[in-house]
Image: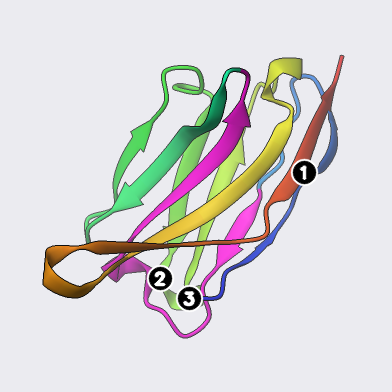
Amino acid sequence: QVQLVVAGGGLVQAGGSPRPLCAAPGRSVSNYRMAWVRPAPGKEREFVAGIRWSAGITTYADSVKGRFTISRDNAKNTVYLQMNSLKPEDTAVYYCNIRTPGLSGSYLYDWGQGTQVTVSS
C-alpha cells in the first residue's frame, strides 16, 4: 500500500488561492498517475484533476478548468493542486490518489486522508 500525506486545506474566502499538496514518500511521482478527487452531490466522488506520464500530462474536470492547476515536484515526490478563483461550491474534502500497476495488467489505487477546503462567501 502506498502511503500518501495530504495537507494544505483550510478555510478560504471566495476567490482565494490555496495550494493543497499530496506527498508520496518513497515513490517517484513522475512514474505514476496521480489525481485529486472530491465528493460531489449525487455522486460518490468527482474527478477534479490528474497528472500522468513523465511529461506531466494534465486533465481537469470541466468545473475547474481555468481555475485549478495540478503540478508535480518530482524531487519532492509531491503533487500540488493550485486552486484559484474559488467558489463556495468548491467546498469539499479533497482526496489525493495514486494509481500503481497491479497484477495481470490491473491497476491499484491508494488514497490519502483528504484535506478539507471550505470556501466562504
Question: Residue 33 location in percent, x, y?
Answer: 32, 57
Left or right: 67, with 57 as reference point: right
Q: Amino acid at mark 1?
A: Gln
Residue drawn at (79%, 19%) of the image: 14
Q: Nearer the viewer, mark 3 or mark 2?
A: 3
Q: Earlier in the sequence, mark 3 or mark 1?
A: 3
Q: Which residues are magenta?
A: 20-41
Secondary element at image label 2: helix
Mark 3, Cα crowd under 10 Å, few <14 / some 14-19 / many 20+, is: some
- For the view shown, which residue lies furthest in the bottom direction? 26
- Which of the image's four quarters has the C terminus? top right
Q: Which residue is mark 2?
A: 74
Q: Earlier in the sequence, mark 3 or mark 2?
A: 3
Question: Residue 40 lies in magenta, yes or no?
Answer: yes
**Who is closer to the viewer here, 62 or 13?**
62
Q: Amino acid at mark 3?
A: Val
**Who is closer to the viewer here, 39 or 50?**
39
Q: Which mark is residue 9?
A: none
Q: Which residue is mark 3?
A: 2
Q: Which mark is residue 116?
A: 1
Secondary element at image label 3: loop
Q: Earlier in the sequence, mark 1 or mark 2?
A: 2
